[in-house]
Amino acid sequence: MVFGTKENKFLVPYRIFRGIDAGDAGVDIPIPKTVDFFDQKKTFGDKLKCGAYLGFVGGASFALNDIAYHTHLTEAKARLLRFTYFTAPTVMAGVGYVAALELAKKYTETYQSAYCFAALIPAGIDASWRRDIRRFPKVFGFLAAAGFCYATLVDENAALNFWASDNPNLPAGQVYRKHHFLDWPHKEHIGPKLDFDFVTVKDPGPTYAKWEK
């Protein structure tokens, strides 16, 4: 589950008896630890390039939307100036955010503090660009809260992958997908599952291991 723990803490999996010779070796695959997004970059230059790219993509999106749907500019020079008006501050904010973040990581004890400190740079750029000091606490509060939550999720080893599970022990693929509408006819009733069994342990049923003693 996205933003949840990678370990299955609610529904305890039943350990199947695989024989005395097999033991526990190779049964459970170690779950990879969640790593900060910017820590995955090798060099400081790569991190700055990533911040500049994200800032450019965000500014270009706002600029194209403004030119196409709000200002309706037709002259090429006016479009270029309007595009630069949006992309220049966002690129500066992206690069400054990453630089402040990496600097704060070296002098702070937690990543939460580093992300909160890094939010000062884009908040200051936005307030200067808008020429409104009231924008500073709004942008700073949003970015600091988002960075604090992200750093907390990384520390808690939470799953941050939207497309696939980060737990290699969970079955995946076409074989394990549910191809029946509302799980019918494998349920006693037609409709969604009404019983909540995510806290209790399911009955594994009879196994031959019970009589091998």
Image (tube, rainbow, N blue to C red):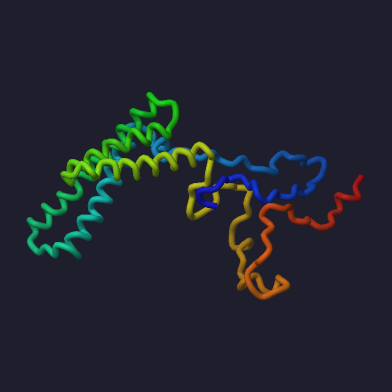
Q: Return the residue nearer the eye: 121 or 35.
A: 121
When asked about the image quadrant of residue 197, the answer is bottom right
Image coordinates of residue 19 in percent, x first then y, are 81, 45
Please tell me which residue lies in front, 174 or 63. 63
Across and down, in percent, residue 123 comes to 26, 40
Please tell me whether residue 155 is drawn above or below residue 185 in the rendered image. above
Q: In which quarter of the image is residue 103?
A: top left
Total residue callouts: 0
Q: In which quarter of the image is the C terminus?
A: top right
Asked if residue 1 lies left or right of residue 115, the reply is right
- Residue depicted at x 84% and y 54%: 207
Q: In this view, does 102 lie above or below 126?
A: above
Q: Which residue lies furthest to the front in this view?
A: 134
Residue at horizontal 67 percent and vertical 60 percent from the top:
196
127 horizontally vs 28: left or right: left
On the image, the x and y values in percent for residue 120 come to: 29, 36
At x 72%, y 39%, the residue is 25
Give the answer, above or below, for where 181 lies relative to 139: below
- Residue at the farthest top position: 107
